[in-house]
Amino acid sequence: GIPYISKNRRKRMKAIAEELSSGNYDVVCLQEVWSIKDFEMIKYKTQQQLPHSHYFY
């Protein structure tokens, strides 16, 4: 979500991270993760299940 504009952005990003960390995925692609802080939070919470990541800007 876009910082300062998207409603409940932090709550939604945390929910996405929780889902990804509890699932069994081989590949995950996320579009429109605008904030590097959101990316870093998702990366931290999913590092055991999804050890490889890259942030394109």
Image: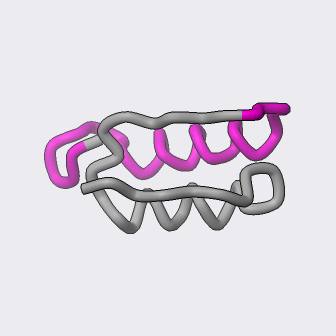
Please say if 47 is above or below 11: below
Is 39 or 29 nearer to us in this picture? 29
Is 9 or 46 nearer to us in this picture? 46
* Percent x, y of residue 33: 35, 46
From the viewer's perspective, tell me whether residue 39 is left or right of residue 17. Answer: left
Kindly indicate the quadrant of the structure image that contains residue 32. Answer: top left
Q: How many marks?
A: 0
Name the residue: 27% across, 37% down.
Answer: 7
Name the residue: 16% across, 53% down.
Answer: 4
From the viewer's perspective, tell me whether residue 52 is left or right of residue 6. Answer: right
Please say if 16 is above or below 50: above
Write down the region rendered in magenta. 2-26
The residue furthest left is 5
Kindly indicate the quadrant of the structure image that contains residue 43. Answer: bottom right
* Percent x, y of residue 55: 40, 58
Quadrant of the snapshot with the C terminus: bottom left
Name the residue: 69% across, 39% down.
Answer: 20
Name the residue: 48% across, 45% down.
Answer: 13
* Percent x, y of residue 36: 35, 65
From the viewer's perspective, tell me whether residue 2 is left or right of residue 15. Answer: left
From the viewer's perspective, tell me whether residue 13 is left or right of residue 23. Answer: left
Scheme of image coloration = one colour
Kindly indicate the quadrant of the structure image that contains residue 42. Answer: bottom right
Quadrant of the snapshot with the N terminus: top left
Is 14 or 30 nearer to us in this picture? 30
Residue 7 colored in magenta in the image: yes
Residue 41 colored in magenta in the image: no
